[in-house]
Image (cartoon, rainbow, N blue to C red):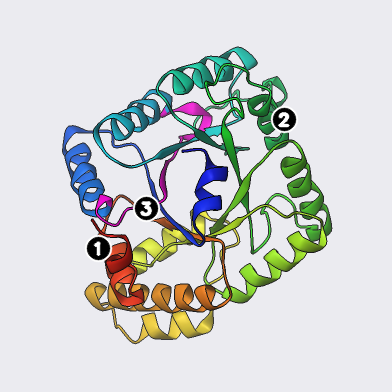
Amino acid sequence: MHIRDIFAQRRPTFSFEFFPPKTAETSQALYETISELEAFKPDFVSVTYGAGGTTRELTHDLVVRIKQTTSLDPIPHLTCVCHSEEDIGGILERYAEAGVSNILALGGDPPRGLANYEKAKDAFQHASDLVRFIRNFSGHPDNRGFGIGIAGFPEGHPATPNRLLEMDYLKAKVDAGADYICTQLFFDNRDFLDFRDRCHLAGINVPIIAGIMPISSASGMKRMAELAAGARFPAKLLKAISRCNGDEAAVERVGIHYATEQCADLLDHQADGFHFYTLNKSRATREIYASLGLKDSRSV
């Protein structure tokens, strides 16, 4: 379903993110997760795309498999890095043929281990260029073309410390044809609410989905801090985790409780949607749904 129709039918939306598995064992585990979460009837699910397109075929295969074998509506990620216009055009054609309705267009991270990578050689220098190319793609059976999502950064884009300039760049992506914004993870709702207010002041009026990642372990939190550059962990959260004294099961309970409180507060503040970064696991998301009373209204 086109993302505009999804938002027209229901807000807030609820959605999940998966990443492509690389082995038969992890593939089976992911499909168990997908089966468990399918019962909650999310509005869509997204599938990540490795730096430099390193998971291009894995992403495509997972998206098509979800589309063909489940009731879920998959949205593939697509990045600028290491791609020509011909590459992107071919990818869009394959998704259009598979009946995929939406794309999440991202700038993308530089590929690790590729010493001779030169960003200047990429056909799309900015996410706004990719958005514009997707918007102008004429091979989709829906006469509106693909629905297009873009990323937003409530805590600030790590590559753009100037927050005023950051809004200009975000507005450029919306003006190029984006239909909605999905935010990076955050742990202080004040960052999200301030980001939403600044979007409105900048004339950005598309739906803004809150990215939620429940902490499942102390080591995972440290990895999160490295991968999501600039991620801020409020003292309230850090104190609760420190009281767990290394008990990983307790850390997971704290993470689920904290994320549930985040979502309840954002519901009160009428967030347009919630996107759960699942890390290909279902427990945290299922428990949050149950605590918020969402399961009964969405389950089969």
Can the viewer see residue 169? yes
Relative height, residue 90 to residue 222 (above, below): above
Q: Is residue 109 magenta?
A: no
Cβ–Cβ below 8 Å for labels 3 and 2? no
Query: Which residue is found at the position 54% from the left and 66% from the top?
Result: 186
Circle 3: residue type: Pro
Q: Position of residue 216 (x, y in %)?
A: 32, 66
Element under label 3? loop
- Tell me the distance, in whole angstroms, between the alpha carbons under discs 3 and 2: 30 Å
Taking the image as shown, residue 119 lies to the left or right of residue 243, namely: right
Q: Quadrant of residue 86?
A: top right
* 260 vs 236: above or below: above
Residue at mark 2: 129
Q: Residue 155 location in percent, x, y?
A: 64, 64
How far across and how far down the image is residue 154, in percent?
A: 64, 62
Which residues are the magenta region? 38-55
Picture mark count? 3
Label 2: state its secondary structure: helix
Residue 268 in the image: above or below residue 91: below
In the image shown, does 286 or 80 lie closer to the viewer? Answer: 286
Which residue is under mark 1?
283
Label 1 residue SS: helix
Badge 3 crowding class, 10 Å Cα cut-off, few under 14, some 14 to 19, many 20 or more, is some
Q: Which residue is mark 3?
A: 42
- Please name which of the two marks, 1 or 3, marks the residue nearer to the observer: 3
Residue drawn at (49%, 27%), measured in percent from left and top? 53
Amino acid at pointer 2: Asp
Residue at image coords 55%, 51%: 8
Displayed quadrant of residue 203: bottom right
